[in-house]
Image (spheres, rainbow, N blue to C red):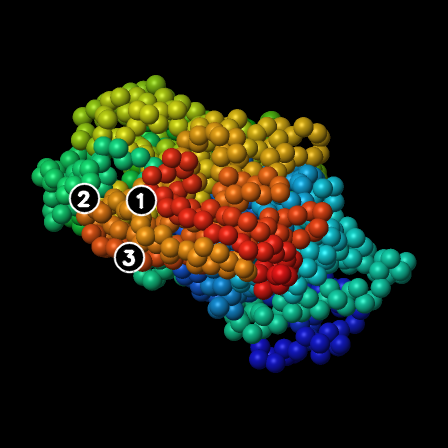
Amino acid sequence: MSSKTDFDVEKTLSKLTLRERITLLAGRGWWHMEPIKGKVRSLRMSDGPNGVRGTQFFNGTPSSCFPCSTGLASTFDVELAQRIGKALAVECAAKGVHVLLAPTVNTQRSPLGGRGFESFSEDPLLNGKMASHYINGLQSKGVAATIKHFVANDQEFERFSISSEVSHRALREIYMKPFQIAIRESNPWALMTSYNRLNGLHASEHSWLLQDVLREEWGYKGSLMSDWTGTYSTVEAINAGLDLEMPGPSVVRGPALIRALQSEKLFPTDIEVRARKVLELVKYAEASSIEFDKKEASVDNPEMRALLRRAAASSVVILKNSDGLLPIEVTGDNLILQYLHGQKPDMFKFMPSFAVIGPNAKHAMISGGGSAALSPTYMVSPLQGIEEAASHGHSLKDDQVKYSLGLMTQRYTPLVDPHISLPSGSGPGGKFEFWNKSPNDSFLSTGVDLSEKLPDAAWNVSAVSAYAFLADGIPDDKVDEVCWIRWTSVFTPDESGEWMFGLGIAGRGNLFVNNTLVVDLSTEAPQGDLFFGLGTIEKRGKFSVETGKQYTLEVRLSNAEFMQRDAPFTTRGGMRVGAYKYVDEDKGIEEAVRLATVRDVAVLVVGLNHDYESEGFDRPNMDLPGRTNELVTKVLKANPRTIIVVQSGTPVKMPWIKEANTVVQAFYGGNETGHGLADVLFGKVNPSAKLPLTFPKRLRDSPAHPSFSSHAQERGKVHYNEGIFVGYRGFEINDIAPLFPFGFGLSYTTYTYSSLSLPSTTSDGNFTVKFKIKNTGYRDGKEIVQVYVTDVESSLPRPVKELAGFTKVSVNAGEEADAEVTLDVTALSFWESRQGTWIAEKGDFDVIVAASSAKDEKNLLKGRITLTKTITWTGLGPTSAKK
């Protein structure tokens, strides 16, 4: 076998038989490529984008979780994106991963997209720039990036079959452009096709998309793989250029390719071309020095923790601070509230008391759901972060920070994980046992005698989490696909009273607490959204407990009925157990209001979580869940000194926004969610983040409304009626004021812009915009400056303005800094479908330097440049421009 230093693609290819070449064109299991004994080793893949899960959904090795992609994009910090890419490569090496399935650069067309949190932005430039630096960081350490999902995979409803009906111009200017930028600036070594159809034809078999544009026009040389179960044809996908079907075992290749060769619908040369591309990906793996078939390990060290914390804090956006409540500053052993009104702050020397309230305060919401979810090495909740910051390294006073739930708004009960330990007492978690036939006749009975001894299990394993998606991590030689499962654990509550337990499964089963049936999902198991839509609804039941006492938990289930369904992949089902101290909603809100009334400062942490934003389904609306808005309104009325923290990956409605003085958008911050938030609230970090997407006041204001998800105008199709007017472009062309505009975010200092300088003309579209930024406040800070371009007179309608560039500038308090942004012809161009080219038309362009995209932006500079000749170009960018 070739060593890592001399893997020769052509030599290896020449030694492979036709059947071996065919074997290479589909995966082995979920995360590996099929090896060819003695010739080709099996490279390993893993999900991203905010972490490296490794090879197991079930009982996987814990991972570092970075902020979700919208949170990362809110930093507008390409250097940070590159550092995170490098850190993810270190984690890949620890897990033996050669190919990371990231980044995701699909466009946030609507606030309701289930995976919106997984992509960077509604703007193609910001999307592409963040992606390219992320990729450069990852690949600089030998790990292949897999940019995804190509293309127009912007909703989850009917995601395997829906046809995204998109105009050619919108495709080029909005949906394909992030891929174009990233391929030009970072050359990702792999690309993943999307599940959906594009204008009637599945992306994985779309010759125009994969051959004409990607391979020929853009000159892309990397390997193409399908999304998992996203290969739907044999001949068509091969001819279109799809190299690798994932996952394995193959459904539409293997013997089907042999038959296609026999009928001469395909030829050996077609197989050779595809196999060569797979081997080129193997070559990167061989050159990476990353061990093959490595035992997976976690990376948890001070350097990783520091970067996780920096990333979390950098992603927090201040939306309102009208009373100057923020930052809450710690000085020595004293806490002071600092009110900033553009003058040197007054210091109020007292020790404020805090009420920390809300469903997202005690439970750390580190990421969205689906492929992005992982088991973290550790988690810091907002409550923990605030307690630590308030203590300033010392013991908290007895009543300095008090917590109240308010009400539980999670779609599913919070995982019971923090409260469970193995029956043996040897560590956290629970024990799973598997049988290949029912252990006895009453195994799934609601009246089963749990003390009855069961026969020895076929296999057993302990796991730290009560969430188990059993798609992997189970030995096939010991456990059949159809199996019976028992999970046992010891539950130790941290509060006395009535607790609510929740159970969701893929199959049928029951949950018992102290040998008492609490949840019955064996008699009836209605279909729900759990486990990528393969599981049941969550059923709930109550049980009274006392603090510190131990209670047995037992789940018995079988996946036999589940396996009769048409799942798109093999899995032994799944199980999810949750629990929380039950609080009547009316009483919970009353308690939260009472606490807020008697505290100096209230921090109210609300929002969404991975139950609402996840792969597999879209959100039905922009509302905060349940009675959240009522809780917010009543707490605000009780204490105007309330800091409202909203956690979500995409926009939510804020009907109380006028009454609120202090509002923070926190996104999903990863492992260090709590520390990152506290660092901003308490002034350790001067916030600089700005929104990477527009927050509408109402869903109907979204340019994609109502042609999105299940509200499409035709069955099986979703029409992108807004064309190029996505996000802020749509708000501006329709003259609709958003709740918060794209690019908006506040700081604890203030800035002024001045001295705009740019050339009066350009003949090739290249020019540099120069200006000055002055920090007019009393804190050092960083300012994100955005450069927009307006085509003064165009032959086709264009947006009012488009983001053409941005920069993040550090400026010390009271000082001034020079800044510049260099643009090229791509900033002046639009797609001309008749000619099939990009075109920058001769004429005038306004150049706008601004702190946000807001129509009434005060910190704004404006200049004009004239393009002296029309330029048309094709390919990836200006290097291929024709004049």
Label at residue 677:
1
Per the image, label 1 sits on a secondary structure element best described as helix
Q: Position of residue 800 (x, y in %)?
A: 51, 39
In the current view of this chain or complex, which residue is farthest to the top? 586
Give the left or right position of residue 754, taking residue 345 as reference.
right
Question: Closest to the observer: 427 or 211?
Answer: 211
Give the residue pinned by disc 3.
Answer: 817
Which of disc 1 and disc 3 is earlier in sequence? 1
For residue 374, the mark is: none
Counting residues from the start of the chain, the first of labels 2 and 1 encountered is: 2
Q: In x, y percent, where is residue 551?
A: 38, 36
Q: Residue at x 58, y 51 (%)?
A: 842
Residue 596 appears in view: yes
| Residue depth check, mark 3 versus mark 1: number of the one nearer the observer | 3
Crowding around mark 1 (Cα neighbors within 10 Å: few <14, some 14 to 19, many 20+) is many
Residue 629, by quadrant, is top left
Between 822 and 218, the one lying in front of the other is: 822
Q: Which amino acid lies under the numbered mark 1 shown in the image of this protein? A: Leu
Residue under the point 54% across and 59% down: 763
Q: Amino acid at mark 3?
A: Ala
Query: Mark 2 Cα within 10 Å, few/some/many (few <14, many 20+)?
Result: many
Q: Which mark is residue 329?
A: 2
Residue that protrudes farthest toward the right in the picture: 263
